[in-house]
Image (tube, grey):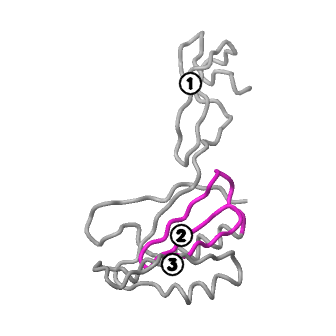
Amino acid sequence: MSEKTCPKCGSVETRKYGWKILAGGKKAQMFQCKRCGSYFRGKGLAKLSEPYRYTRFRWWNKIDLEEVEKDLSKEFSVKKFSPSRDEMELALGKDERDELMVSADTLTAMLSAFRAVLFQKESASFTEKDVELRKIVLELYKRERPTPFPWSFSTEPKFEAD
């Protein structure tokens, strides 16, 4: 039975109907049978071109970026970003603006005192190194929301690993 064969009546007289978005960021070709009129999904799946992006948080205690930099620089590429500081500035958290950019093969993480953003520039399967970076970041930043209050939920997008 080919991808274009109707599972209901077995007819090969079908036409393409469109795409159906599936869980995990994939899409499947839909078909309509010309004989019985039923709709069905083709077997082939196509990956959407959405790169991975996920934000995680810490709530109460900030992370020591210098210690994290030492630990992660052994295995990953790490760059530190420190914005210039003005002693006259009056702002909450002005000493918590430092960030680390940690890069694996296709996955990059921007780490700050209370937030981590995992992202890919282009959609690709995760390598072992990417999976390891993701695991480390999710252990350090355990929360999916920026606050303990019940708003601003985020869910992790699906990804493929080699």
Query: Closest to the observer: 62 or 138?
Result: 62
Which element is circle 3 on?
loop
How far across and how far down the image is residue 93, in percent?
Answer: 34, 80
Identify the disc placed on residue 2.
none
- Disc 3 to disc 2: CB gap under 8 Å: no
Question: Which of the 4 image quarters holds residue 31?
Answer: top right
How far across and how far down the image is residue 43, in percent?
Answer: 67, 34
How far across and how far down the image is residue 7, in percent?
Answer: 63, 25
Label 3 or label 2, whichever lies nearer to me, is 3
Query: Closest to the observer: 25 or 98?
Result: 98
* Disc 2 target residue: 110
Picture residue at 59% right of the left edge, 10% below the top: 34
- Disc 2 to disc 1: CB gap under 8 Å: no
Q: Measure how far apart labels 3 and 1 are at the Cα level.
A: 49 Å
Q: Measure how far apart labels 3 and 2 are at the Cα level.
A: 13 Å
Q: Earlier in the sequence, mark 3 or mark 1?
A: 1
Q: Which residues are magenta?
A: 99-128
Q: Residues within 10 Å of mark 3 (few under 14, many from 20)?
A: few
Query: Closest to the observer: 102 or 45?
Result: 102
- Disc 3 to disc 1: CB gap under 8 Å: no
Question: Which of the 4 image quarters holds residue 26?
Answer: top right
* Disc 1 target residue: 18
Identify the disc placed on residue 82.
3
Which element is circle 1 on?
strand
Q: Earlier in the sequence, mark 3 or mark 2?
A: 3
